[in-house]
Amino acid sequence: MKSKKKSIKIALTVFILLIGLASNFPFLFMISSSFKVSGEVMKFPWHLIPDNPTIMNFKALFTNGIYNFQKWYFNTVVMTALTIAIKIFFVSFTAYGFARIKFRGKDAIFLVLLSAMMIPSDIMIIPRYMIFKNLHILDSMWALILPSCVDVYFVFLLRQSFISIPDSISEAAKIDGCSHLKIYWKIIFPLAKPAIATMALFSFTWSWNDYMGPYLYISTMDKQMLSVGVKLFSSGLIQDYGAQMAAATVVLLPILVAFLFCQKFFIEGVASSGVKG
Amino acid sequence: MNKEKKPISKTKEKTSIAQKKEDRYGWLFISPYLIFFTVFTGIPFVIAIVMSFLNVKYITRLDNLKFVGLQNFIKIFTNKEILNSLLRTFQYSLVYVPVIMILGFVLAFMLNNGIYMKKAMRSLVFMPYVSNMVAVAVIFKVLLGNNSPMIIALRNMGFNPPLLLQSLKLALPTVAMISVWKSVGLNMVVYLGALQEVPSELLEAAQIDGATKWQRIRNIIIPMISPTTFFLLISSIIGSFQNFTCIQALTEGGPGQATTVMAVNIVRTAFTKYETSLASAMAFVMFVIVMIVTLIQWRGQKKWVNY
């Protein structure tokens, strides 16, 4: 009985491992191909390890005369960093208000915010264009940063996590004469760091990967972001597979590495955020 | 200051002053967010609805505005091209939603059933979720394209594999499946969280009573995790309607019109054809459909969701 159970467990593990490897094969293919000369990418039989590894593709990416890849990279790094930095404070500050202050009208407003989560973003794209234009942030990275700070989803999640911090902790501070601002900054914010880290990481992936925003709202080439850049690049060099793979690699690598090092926050953040209906 | 003037009992007054202070702080904390929310979500939502009933052409030119009633909506439901793109959105959802729901559950179930290196496996399946769709599309276009080593290998074995992304019939389901590949990790992780909360005593008791494995899944596990299923179902349906990035990156709506779903069509109508009001009306129709689907689910949940 016990050995049968063990063999089932091994079989299941192998099975899942195969699924996992298969679903990561595109990434392996990409990294391997980015070190190959273009002719070798499509060579059959296919080798994981390149015959003559070369970094030519990466060099070409950042030194070609047509596409300003390093500028796009720089823009995306700045935009993502600003988004995360602003969001961490902005969203947690708001979540504190909803979680730990008992003011009148709170529940009604929170309900409005929650129901706004149901609005599909497609309906916003045209009016937002007009609003960005009137705020004079069209064709700048602020058109991507500011709207993403209004993230109801994370206000909701951080609120949950703030509520779960025992009241007794802030009560004591209150008796000692601490104001809400101080309680937020000195007590709640530090205690909720794991939840905030989860938010920061998800914001990182969403901003870094955003395609629709820059595609619609940014028109100047030099202000463009990586997602749009890679698309331009790959349709411009349609036959140069090595270069395309190098471009995909430099876009994907930061995010995959961030994931590998912070899986805990990504996955447990989702699992524990308590999606319980 | 008011303390002396108002003839109310002292304790009541105290709470009301404290409450006023709380109110002030509460609004201090949420008003920056509310301003942003109003500017970037509230006002756009209202504009979108108003615009559906006007005749705006060219997104930035607002002269010559006229109220045209339901004209934009009549156009949507009489225009074959738009109706076809709506139909494709449904076809896409019909592939995406069932596959991602079932696959997500099966993967979570297998992971939860005790395997080695559970966390590593979980990460492996979750990985595509964080990836950049455009970069991923570059890879898939090469992998599924004409000269790909995989295609050549299959050809050498005597098969004649179709070029999935260039086939009129298969492009849409292929795009949906790539989308499932990318997002299934999230469903799996959420399901895994729910499965871990199913009390093991319950399963053991059922086992002692002679319930088969299948009976335990059907009669205990599936009802126990039904709130999660409900949540995932709604968010997967909404997610399946918002497929612009995935389709634009992989096929740009082609070949022909084969993958031109509503989301792609809305952007095209607004930013290439400059029919701003018509595009708004199309987006509004999508919004209403999402609402209806959600409401139906909400009413139907009483029958199968156990809290």
Image: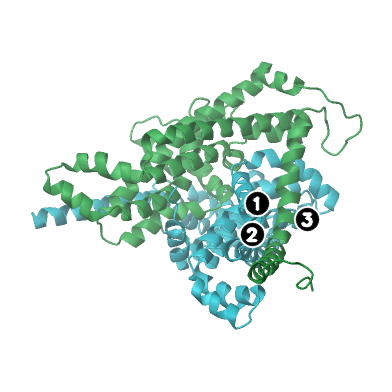
Chain colours: A cyan, B green
Amino acid type at mark 1: Ile
* Chain letter of the residue carrying label 3: A
Residue under numbered circle 3: A140
Say which of marks 2 and 3 sits in front.
3
Q: CA distance from mark 1 to mark 2?
A: 53 Å
Left or right placement of residue A15 versus residue B27 in this view: left
Name the foreground residue: B169 vs A277.
Answer: A277
Camera sees residue B272: no
Say which of marks 1 and 2 sits in front.
1
> Does A277 appear above or below A64?
above
Asked if badge 1 and badge 3 are on a common chain, one would say yes
Question: Which residue is most to the bottom?
Answer: A176
Query: Do the numbered discs 2 and 3 sit on residues whose CB atoms are within 8 Å?
Result: no
Left or right placement of residue A185 versus residue A146 in this view: left
> Does A219 appear above or below B58?
below
Amino acid type at mark 3: Ser
Residue under numbered circle 2: A60
Residue under numbered circle 1: A109
The tag earlier along the polypeptide, 1 or 3, is 1
The label on residue B290 is none
> Does B28 appear above or below B112?
below
> Does A89 appear above or below A7?
below
From the top left corner, tell me how far across and down residue B205 is, in percent: 16, 50
Quarter occupied by residue B232: top left
Say which of marks 1 and 3 sits in front.
1
Left or right placement of residue A241 versus residue A277 in this view: right
Q: 10 Å neighbourhood of mark 2: few (<14), some, or many (≥20)? A: some
Q: 10 Å neighbourhood of mark 3: few (<14), some, or many (≥20)? A: some
Q: CA distance from mark 1 to mark 3?
A: 31 Å
